[in-house]
Every structure is written in C-alpha cells, then in structure tokens.
C-alpha cells in the first residue's frame, strides 16, 4: 500500500463527495433554508404588523374611552342642569301654591270675621231688645220692629 495512492484515492473520493453534495444535497438544503428564512421573515413582518395594529387599536381604544368620558361628563352636566331646573320649577310652584293657600286662608279669615261680626251684631241687637223690653216693661215685637232692628245692626 502506497500512501500516495491512498491519499490520491481519498482526494478523489472527497472530490466526488463534494460534487455529489453540491449537486444533489446542497440545493434542497439551500431551498429549505431559504423557505425557512422566508417563513421567519413573514412571521417577523406579521409580528410587526400585529404590533402596529395593536398600537393603533390601543390609540383607538384610548380615543373611544376619552370620547365616552366626555359624553358622560356632558350627560352629567346636562342632568345636573335639568335637576337644578326641576328644583327651581318646584320652588316656583310651591311658592305659587303657598301664595294661593295664603290668599284663600285670608279670604276664609275675612269671611269668618264678617260672620262673627254679623252674629255679634245680631246678638247685641237681641240683647239690646231684651234690655229695652225690660226697661219698658213690655216685650218688643221683633216682627213689627224689623226695620228698627236692621237700622240698629247697620249702626253697630
């Protein structure tokens, strides 16, 4: 065995292995690696798009939340304004009702005072007639002297 022949055989075998690898093994490996690189690049691009979409969604959510808070504060302000208006209306109605009740009560009081005066005049005239009857020693006929009694009531 010659070392040179062995080395030459190994070199030829190695060259055939390299050629075979370059011709049949390397292209599928490179295609698989390219496909894998493309898949990875697509995944990274999708992740970037997802990240960008997430940022946009967060901004939209923040904007919607801000608009919701503004609308809620507008609704609260409007309801507080309406509540104030209702309270003012109730106060006005209560004041008007109180004034009406006060006027009615004053009218009732005036009417009662008038009735009491009329009763007092009637009683005073009856007492005066009774006193006059006793003074005169005889009883005065109320029917006959009705005009006199009306005049007396009017003067009292």
Image: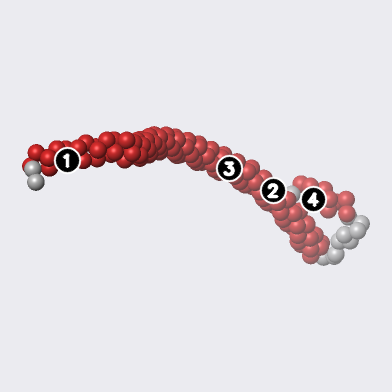
Mark 1 and mark 3: Cα distance apart in space? 109 Å
Mark 4 and mark 1: Cα distance apart in space? 167 Å
Q: Quadrant of residue 89?
A: top right
Q: Residue at x 76, y 59 (%)?
A: 123
Secondary structure at badge 4 equals helix
Residue at numbered disc 3: 86
Residue at numbered disc 1: 9
Q: Residue at x 27, y 35 (%)?
A: 19
Q: Nearer the viewer, mark 4 or mark 2?
A: 2
Q: Is residue 123 above or below residue 77?
A: below
Mark 3 and mark 2: Cα distance apart in space? 26 Å
User: Contact (CB < 8 A) between labels 3 and 4?
Assistant: no
Q: Nearer the viewer, mark 3 or mark 4?
A: 3
Q: Where residue 80 sits: x, y (%)?
A: 51, 41
Q: Residue at x 79, y 60 (%)?
A: 126
Mark 3 and mark 4: Cα distance apart in space? 58 Å
Q: Where residue 84 sits: x, y (%)?
A: 53, 40
- First of labels 4, 2 by sequence position: 2
Q: Is residue 155 left or right of residue 88?
A: right
Q: Where residue 35 sits: x, y (%)?
A: 37, 38
- First of labels 1, 3 by sequence position: 1
Mark 4 and mark 2: Cα distance apart in space? 32 Å
Q: Nearer the viewer, mark 1 or mark 2?
A: 1
How packed is label 1: few (under 14 Cα within 10 Å), some, or many (20 or more)? few
Q: Nearer the viewer, mark 1 or mark 3?
A: 1
Q: Is residue 125 above or below residue 72?
A: below
Secondary structure at badge 3 equals helix
- First of labels 3, 4 by sequence position: 3
Residue at numbered disc 4: 152
- First of labels 4, 1 by sequence position: 1
């Amino acid at each position: 065995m010659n070392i040179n022949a062995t080395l030459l055989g190994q070199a030829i075998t190695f060259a055939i292995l390299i050629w075979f690898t370059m011709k049949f093994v390397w292209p599928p490996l490179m295609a698989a690696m390219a496909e894998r690189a493309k898949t990875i690049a697509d995944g990274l691009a999708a992740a970037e798009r997802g990240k960008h979409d997430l940022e946009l969604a967060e901004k939209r959510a923040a904007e919607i939340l801000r608009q919701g808070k503004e609308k809620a504060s507008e609704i609260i302000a409007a309801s507080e304004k309406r509540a104030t208006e209702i309270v003012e209306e109730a106060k006005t109605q209560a004041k008007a009702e109180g004034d009406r009740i006060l006027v009615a009560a004053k009218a009732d009081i005036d009417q009662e005072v008038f009735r009491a005066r009329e009763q007092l005049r009637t009683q005073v005239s009856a007492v005066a007639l009774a006193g006059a009857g006793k003074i005169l020693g005889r009883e005065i006929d109320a029917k006959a002297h009705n005009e006199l009694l009306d005049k007396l009531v009017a003067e009292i």
